[in-house]
Image: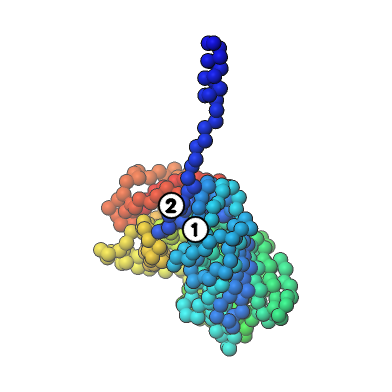
């Protein structure tokens, strides 16, 4: 009887218990999207006619869900979704201003999202997908920084979600389409159109994805000394004004490769010129875009025009390493990448033409930063962000001019060679991933004998501390977490 009772107890105790866990129901985001869904790749096809007010899109997003869930949230703005599926099954779609909610039962594991949609081409302003007119012809360009990729694709429009992208553009046959990577195939399709399929990119944040469509002229600018193909892509009729930029372009790439001693990270580099971008330029990986005023000059350009070409191309090309190869994990470190590229402008210009004595311009810019920072209302350089509408405000004179002055302090304190070693360490350690200010400081510490005396905030406005949250710092396939203030 005793053994029977023991066996009965054992049998009862070994019965499996069923525990029901409710699926994760992600709430509507306010700033950052939930992290339960991680994209592994984007594959998008866009049909774009620069003469038309809109475009159609088809995007396939492969990824994984880390737990059983009821919804996936993506970023989307001014897009009309015509159909969405997950692993081949229709899902319920709801648009909420900047957000796209895909609601269905999602099991943990791989998921394939397929979304068909329509978007708008902006005719005023130079953000998102926008149109320029030149000599009676229409051109479409993109400018997604900081959070405007969502006007072209449903995606996770956050800088630390670096993911490979593969684009295909369908357009009328008299147009040329360009993007971040070289075209793999150009094929005639029905309706007098051409389909251009581009190679897959290295992992990129959504804001660095770019394309241009229109009746462009292409100017071969040769190659860098290491063999990087370089081109200028300009509106029809403007090739004759590219001579100075085409000559300067390879020299600038060579100067940067020599300085960093790190190979150019992408298979090619194009400079795409728009009739107007509000006098601005943008560092998309492999496809810099710029306002014509910064690149196209007359046959005998003035010193001011020549310097403007060097500064513009130099600033954006330096971002191919600092900003593109290694991307700030969040917008509180916009100052780090923009300050670096602004500081680097003078390094490039001095190496390009020492007789210009651009070190004087560096001093003038630093003094301008002091003047801006002297105001009681001046914001801290590394600012904690709590709402999406605060993000655009980080692209200001504080980030560019004060950021450049702070970078200069680091170099002077530890010495130029130690600083270059720090940059090489930073680029190699976080290549095709993301990093934050503390990661940059860690590379400086590793490459020099300098150590910060204290992590506490200072009374100096340049060093007032914010309290950013801890975040992932690595590209897909790895993780590293650090946090810090500046």
Asked if residue 301 is positioned above or below residue 394 in the image, the reply reads below
Identify the residue at image location x=57%, y=69%: 82
Q: Nearer the viewer, mark 1 or mark 2?
A: 1
Residue that mark 2 sits on: 437
Judged from the image, the secondary structure of the residue bearing numbered disc 1 is strand
Q: Horizontally, is 101 left or right of 201 in the view? A: left
If you read the primary sequence from the N terminus, does the residue marked by circle 1 or circle 2 appear first? Answer: 1
Asked whether residue 247 is in view, the answer is no
Mark 2 nearby-residue class (10 Å; few <14, some 14–19, many ≥20): many
Which residue is farthest left? 376
Location of residue 235 in the rendering, given as x and y in whole percent from the top left corner? 60, 81
Judged from the image, the secondary structure of the residue bearing numbered disc 2 is helix
Identify the residue at image location x=56%, y=75%: 141
Looking at the image, do the residues carrying marks 1 and 2 touch, with CB atoms under 8 Å apart?
no
Which quadrant of the structure image shows residue 199? bottom right
Which residue is farthest bottom? 136
Question: As rendered, which of 92 and 160 lies closer to the eye?
Answer: 92
Location of residue 208 in the rendering, given as x and y in whole percent from the top left corner? 54, 64
Question: As rendered, which of 436 and 214 lies closer to the eye?
Answer: 214
Residue that mark 1 sits on: 73
Location of residue 290 in the rendering, given as x and y in whole percent from the top left corner? 53, 74
Q: Work out how far the residue at label 1 is from the one at label 2, CA to CA, in angstroms.
A: 28 Å
Identify the residue at image location x=53%, y=71%: 80
Asked if residue 421 is positioned above or below residue 266 in the image, the reply reads above
Location of residue 285 in the rendering, given as x and y in whole percent from the top left corner? 57, 63
Q: Horizontally, is 205 left or right of 174 in the view? A: left
Mark 1 nearby-residue class (10 Å; few <14, some 14–19, many ≥20): many
Identify the residue at image location x=43%, y=54%: 27
Which residue is farthest front? 1
Question: As rendered, which of 302 and 277 lies closer to the eye?
Answer: 277
């Amino acid at each position: 009887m005793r053994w029977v009772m023991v066996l009965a107890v054992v049998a009862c105790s070994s019965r499996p218990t069923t525990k029901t866990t409710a699926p994760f129901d992600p709430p509507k985001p306010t700033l950052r999207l939930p992290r339960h869904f991680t994209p592994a790749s984007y594959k998008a096809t866009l049909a774009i006619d620069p003469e038309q007010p809109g475009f159609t899109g088809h995007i396939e997003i492969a990824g994984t869900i880390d737990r059983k869930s009821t919804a996936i949230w993506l970023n989307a703005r001014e897009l009309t979704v015509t159909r969405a599926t997950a692993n081949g099954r229709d899902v319920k779609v709801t648009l909420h201003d900047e957000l796209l909610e895909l609601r269905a039962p999602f099991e943990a594991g791989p998921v394939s999202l397929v979304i068909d949609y329509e978007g708008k081409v902006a005719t005023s302003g130079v953000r998102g997908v926008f149109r320029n007119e030149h000599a009676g012809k229409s051109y479409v360009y993109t400018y997604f920084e900081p959070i405007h990729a969502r006007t072209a694709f449903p995606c996770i429009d956050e800088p630390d979600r670096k993911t490979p992208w593969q684009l295909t553009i369908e357009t009328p046959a008299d147009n040329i389409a360009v993007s971040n990577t070289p075209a793999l195939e150009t094929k005639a399709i029905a309706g007098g159109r051409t389909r251009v399929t581009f190679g897959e990119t290295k992992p990129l944040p959504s804001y660095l994805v770019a394309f241009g469509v229109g009746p462009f002229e292409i100017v071969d600018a040769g190659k860098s000394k290491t063999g990087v193909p370089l081109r200028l892509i300009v509106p029809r009729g403007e090739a004759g004004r590219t001579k100075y930029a085409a000559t300067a372009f390879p020299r600038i790439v060579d100067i940067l490769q020599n300085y960093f001693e790190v190979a150019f990270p992408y298979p090619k580099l194009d400079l795409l010129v728009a009739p107007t971008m509000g006098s601005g330029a943008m560092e998309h990986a492999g496809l810099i875009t710029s306002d014509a005023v910064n690149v196209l000059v007359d046959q005998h350009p003035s010193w001011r025009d020549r310097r403007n070409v060097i500064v513009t191309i130099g600033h954006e090309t330096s971002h191919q390493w600092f900003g593109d190869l290694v991307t700030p994990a969040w917008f509180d470190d916009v100052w780090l990448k923009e300050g670096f590229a602004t500081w680097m402008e003078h390094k490039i210009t001095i190496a390009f033409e020492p007789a210009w004595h651009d070190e004087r311009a560096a001093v003038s810019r630093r003094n301008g930063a002091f003047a801006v920072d002297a105001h009681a209302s001046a914001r801290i350089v590394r600012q904690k962000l709590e709402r999406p509408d605060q993000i655009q405000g980080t692209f200001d004179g504080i980030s560019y001019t004060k950021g450049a002055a702070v970078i200069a302090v680091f170099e002077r304190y530890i010495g130029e060679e130690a600083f270059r070693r720090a940059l090489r360490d930073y680029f190699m350690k976080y290549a095709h991933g993301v990093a934050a200010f503390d990661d940059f400081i860690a590379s400086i510490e590793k490459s020099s004998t300098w150590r910060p005396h204290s992590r506490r905030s200072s009374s100096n406005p340049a060093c007032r501390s914010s309290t950013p949250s801890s975040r992932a710092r690595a590209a897909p396939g790895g993780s590293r977490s650090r946090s810090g203030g500046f």
